[in-house]
Amino acid sequence: MRVAMDIRKLRDYGIGTYVRNIVSQIAQLDRENEYVLISRPEDLEFTQTLGPNIRGVISTAGNYSVREQFSIPSIVRRERVDVFHAPHYVLPPLLSCPSVVTIHDCIHLMFPQYLPSRLAYTYARAFMWAATHRSAHVLTVSEASKRDILRFYRIPPDKITVAYNAIDERFNHMPADEDIARVKERFQLHDPFVLYVGNIRPHKNVERLIEAFALVRTGALANTKLLIIGDEISKYPTLRRAVHTGKLHKHVRFLGYVGRDTLAALYRLATVFAFPSLYEGFGLPPLEAMASGTPVVTSNVSSLPEVVGDAAILVDPREPTAIAHGLRRALLDPVLRSQMRARGLERAQHYSWARTTQTILRIYRETAGGR
């Protein structure tokens, strides 16, 4: 069997994490079948480290471009591929072999108001229709995402398989004491702090998190800080206004993008991790925080209760007072934090890229066998 996967999003945060871990696990679990990885020129070196049955093929076509609709099928034909895997919802219509597509979430359909234009919504809806109807099988990352896909598209439920995300291995291992100390000194982290990690798009609900933090920072919690990790903050001036309105200039810090090693240390230094997102297909940051031994306060909507189970405090993300109440509970109760830390570490062990990849390999075999 020869499988092709489009890995051009390898350097993206969300889909890139998915692609990188699936491909790395395939290299360990399957030495018999052949894999063709359609990649950017700068990622060809990565493909050469994976094994003799895995090789990279360069494509310079842009994601979401007209050109990729022709260049990807051309590569698939030339390489005589048996199964093609699209790791996000764009599935070129001219493919000459059966395909498997991963749809991580339905965010564009659930929150069209956050897209840049009506055309972007039409594009997303049309390509997700094509992905769900033209593929041989659909993979998704949670039961919540499966329900959302079935809500928007009338396909048989057994055409969709849930294969959960997991976390990068580095979050399972404690950074060296000197590395943690270095990060603590670099960012002058001498007070307790709440940590948020993720992008800053409106559905992530960071503005309400800042409003909730303004309610929290009183009395015994007056010295508590809020650290926000996420790039493109300049695109969302409402966040700065929320800081100004709450008079939080000395207490809320926007750190932008940080490297993974620094992030691993920040997770462990945080007193509490907050993630009040309005919608997630899976929600990887809360799982990373739990694997780091950090208590989590997160939303009671979409996939997040499914992912965190009983290991986190769940709050209504639309109510700043509810978010504040959850944060206050976690910050003020050391016994509760200890219990959450233990439950979080246990919960994080339920998710494994190896198990997820074994499920995906089974779908590849079934798809190739039904050709």
Image (cartoon, rainbow, N blue to C red):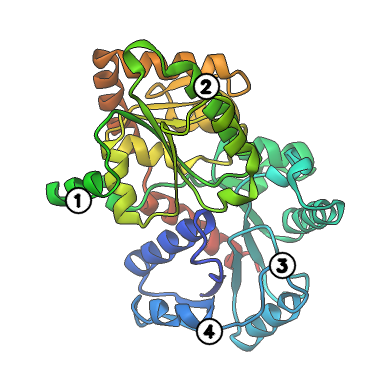
Q: Secondary structure at mark 4?
A: strand
Q: Which amino acid does the dot numbered 2 rest on?
A: Ala
Can I make out residue 349 in this image? no
Amino acid on which the number 4 mark rests in the picture? Val
**Which quadrant holds the C terminus?**
bottom right
Q: Position of residue 275 (x, y in %)?
A: 48, 32
In this view of the protein, which residue sits in the foreground, 216 or 310? 216
Residue nearest the observer in this picture, 191 or 126:
191
Q: Earlier in the sequence, mark 4 or mark 3?
A: 4
For this rendering, which residue is in front, 332 or 222?
Answer: 222
Residue 32 falls left or right of residue 301: left
What mark, if any, has residue 64 been given in the picture?
A: 3
Residue drawn where x is 53% and y is 77% of the image: 39
In the depicted structure, whether residue 348 falls above or below residue 168: above
- Image point 85% across, 56% down: which residue? 119
Residue 182 is labelled as: 1
Q: In front: mark 1 or mark 3?
A: 1
Is label 2 or label 3 in front? 2
Identify which amino acid the numbered label 3 is placed on. Answer: Tyr
